[in-house]
Amino acid sequence: MTPAQVVAEAKARSLRPIYLVAGSEAHFVDEVVKAVRAAALEGAVPGLNEDVFDAAEHRVEQVLAAARTLPMMAPRRLVIVRQVERWEPKGGAQSSAESDDGAKAGDEKKGEKKASDEKKSASSKDAFERLLEYAEAPSPTTTLLLVAGALDKRRRFVQAAMRAGYLVNADPLGRAELPGFVERLARERGNELAAGVADMVAELSGPDLGAVVDAVERLCLYAGRGQTVTEDMVAECVVRLRGASVWELTNAVARRDVAAALTALADVFDPSESVRLVALLAWSTRQLLRFESALRQGASPNEAAQRAGAPPFRARELAQQVRAVPRATLEGWLVTLADMDRALKGASRLPSRTILEKGILELCGKPAGTSATRRGMGA
């Protein structure tokens, strides 16, 4: 199940007796924990019906004892266990109880060694089996919330969680999934997004969902409830640069106008925003590529703009830009922008402004990827 489904269950006060949250995306984990805690402890005396454990410091027996304890002056208690993956045996070995084929020891000596190894780490190797036994007959007055990073999906407990529907996927979102996530966040806050804004926010703030959520919240507050969030608002609130200058820069680069691009860079330059400025150029390049692809497939300029995530009034401008810049050059720009991004993040000893200027000269002048320019950028 998804974190959003858990949140919906929590809001409906329809909590399951057990959830296994597995994945490394902190935003999803925090979202689930917050929603489950609010629902499970509603009306309860603070501190009396919540236990929080760390698997690195506590044994599974302690956790299960707490889970089987009746709530005090409340209908439900909550037991949270973090770092459940720490109960995995070292090296990821699995106990014989969790072996899929149930193979037996080949000889007596091998069996004795196996028994000895299991005895040395019995609490670790038995932890997931004991959780599985509990999950088959959980306490009806407790919600057991297990939080883990990476878990071995072959484990019987994980497989059972999948089948029963209480395994919650908290893996990071892929780049292609981020725009949809941005749109959902905006809708939840009562705002719509102008064409291209969701992809723009994903480019500038992803992949860290905490940064994405922060960006959307700022944009929606800036726009006002019920208002449409525009690209200019993104330039103002997310990149924190003057919107007009940002678009002058991206448009000048798209036109391959060196003088205008360097002038716009001088107006917009902020060392703390250099990486996001490159991300903005990458977003603009991808928009041009999508527009060009739609035109080649027979779409009208207005339809192509819509497919590219741009408002229709930009169709003529985009058409002029793709006529001036061949597709091969646009694809090369993405390579140059990736080099600029790496250089700004520490791969180069050059000042950030110099890196940006060198990159813009390459984008506006000769095709990206020439060895001389790339050596200069990484100097």
Image (cartoon, helix red, strand yellow):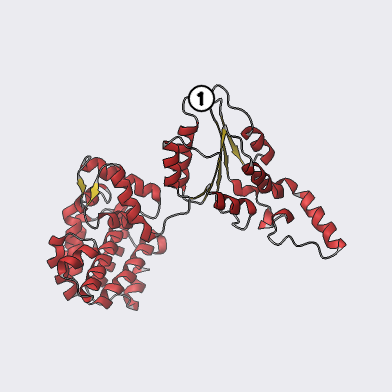
Image check: 153 left or right of 367?
right
What is the x, y in percent for residue 269?
Answer: 24, 56
Q: Would you place residue 227 above or below residue 106 in this image?
A: above
What is the x, y in percent for residue 226?
Answer: 21, 42
According to the picture, the residue beneath numbered tag 1 turns out to be: 46
Residue 310: quadrant of the picture: bottom left
Q: Would you place residue 330 above or below residue 309 in this image?
A: below
What is the x, y in percent for residue 347?
Answer: 41, 64
Q: Check disc 1 and report its element: helix, strand or loop.
A: loop
How many residues crowd mark 1 within 10 Å: few (<14), some (14–19), many (20+)?
A: few
What is the x, y in percent for residue 153?
Answer: 59, 57
Res. 115 visible in picture: yes
Q: What residue is at 46 percent from the left and 42 percent from the top?
A: 32
Residue 108: quadrant of the picture: bottom right
Of residues 4 and 227, which is closer to you in this image? 4
Quadrant showing the C terminus = bottom left
Q: What residue is at 62 percent from the left and 50 percent from the top?
A: 157
Q: What residue is at 24 percent from the left and 48 percent from the top?
A: 192
Q: Would you place residue 97 above or below residue 29 in this image?
A: below
The kind of residue on which mark 1 rests is Pro
